[in-house]
C-alpha cells in the first residue's frame, strides 16, 4: 500500500508505504527493526541522493535539495513493514530525475548540477 500525505504546502512530498513481511524472515521486535534498518542502509549506501534515517523524515529536511530520506521500520502491532519517505518534489521531481538520468546517459557524475540549493519558490 502506498499513501501520499497531501497537505497544503509549497513543496515537498511525504509518503508512507506498507508491505507484509515474509513469515519468519524478520523478527517483529527491536532486533528486527535494527536488522531492517541495516539492510536498507547497506542497500542504499552508494546512492548519493538517498539517505536512510533513524527517525521519520519531515519535508523540511529535503527542502531545496535532491535527497530522498527513507525511514524503514516495523509496525509491531501488525507485523508489517512501514517505510516513510520524504522528497522535495520541486527538485527530486521530474526535472531533477531528468537531470540525474541525463548525467548517467552522458557519462557525467550522477550528482552534476544537483548539489546546489534550489530554493525558489
Image (cartoon, rainbow, N blue to C red):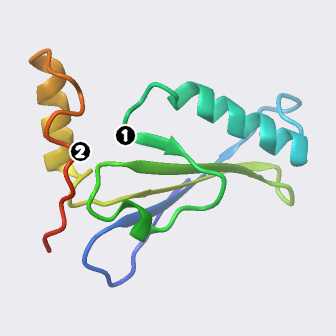
Q: Mark 1 points at which residue?
A: 49
Question: How would you rate the neighbour count of disc 1 (Cα within 10 Å): few for under 14, some for 14-19, many for 20 or more?
Answer: some
Residue plotted at (19% across, 46% down): 96
- In x, y percent, where is residue 107? 14, 15
Q: State whether residue 80 is above or below residue 16.
A: above
Q: Which of marks 1 and 2 is nearer the N terminus?
A: 1
Dot 1: what SS?
loop
For the residues labelled 1 and 2, the Cα–Cα distance comes to: 9 Å
Dot 2: what SS?
loop
Q: Is residue 28 visible?
A: no
Residue placed farthest to the bottom in the image? 8
Q: Mark 2 points at which residue?
A: 115
Tag 1–tag 2 contact (CB < 8 Å) = no
The total number of labels drawn is 2
Q: Nearer the viewer, residue 21 or 97?
A: 97
- In x, y percent, where is residue 82? 66, 52
Q: Nearer the viewer, residue 78 or 51?
A: 51
Q: Nearer the viewer, residue 20 or 32?
A: 32
Which dot marks residue 12? none
Residue plotted at (13% across, 48% down): 95
Q: Which of 75 and 2 is in front in this view?
A: 75
- In x, y percent, where is residue 38? 70, 33
In the rendered image, which quarter is residue 31 located in? Answer: top right
Amino acid at each position: 500500500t502506498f499513501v501520499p500525505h497531501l497537505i497544503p504546502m509549497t513543496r515537498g512530498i511525504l509518503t508512507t508505504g506498507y508491505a507484509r513481511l515474509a513469515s519468519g524472515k524478520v523478527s517483529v521486535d527491536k532486533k528486527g527493526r535494527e536488522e531492517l534498518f541495516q539492510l536498507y542502509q547497506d542497500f542504499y549506501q552508494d546512492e548519493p541522493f538517498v539517505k536512510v534515517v533513524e527517525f521519520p523524515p519531515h519535508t523540511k529536511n529535503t527542502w531545496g535539495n535532491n535527497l530522498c530520506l527513507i525511514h524503514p521500520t516495523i509496525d509491531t502491532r501488525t507485523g508489517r513493514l512501514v517505510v516513510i519517505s520524504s522528497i522535495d518534489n520541486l527538485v527530486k521531481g521530474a526535472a531533477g530525475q531528468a537531470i540525474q538520468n541525463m548525467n548517467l546517459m552522458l557519462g557525467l557524475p550522477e550528482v552534476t548540477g544537483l548539489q546546489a540549493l534550489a530554493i525558489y519558490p
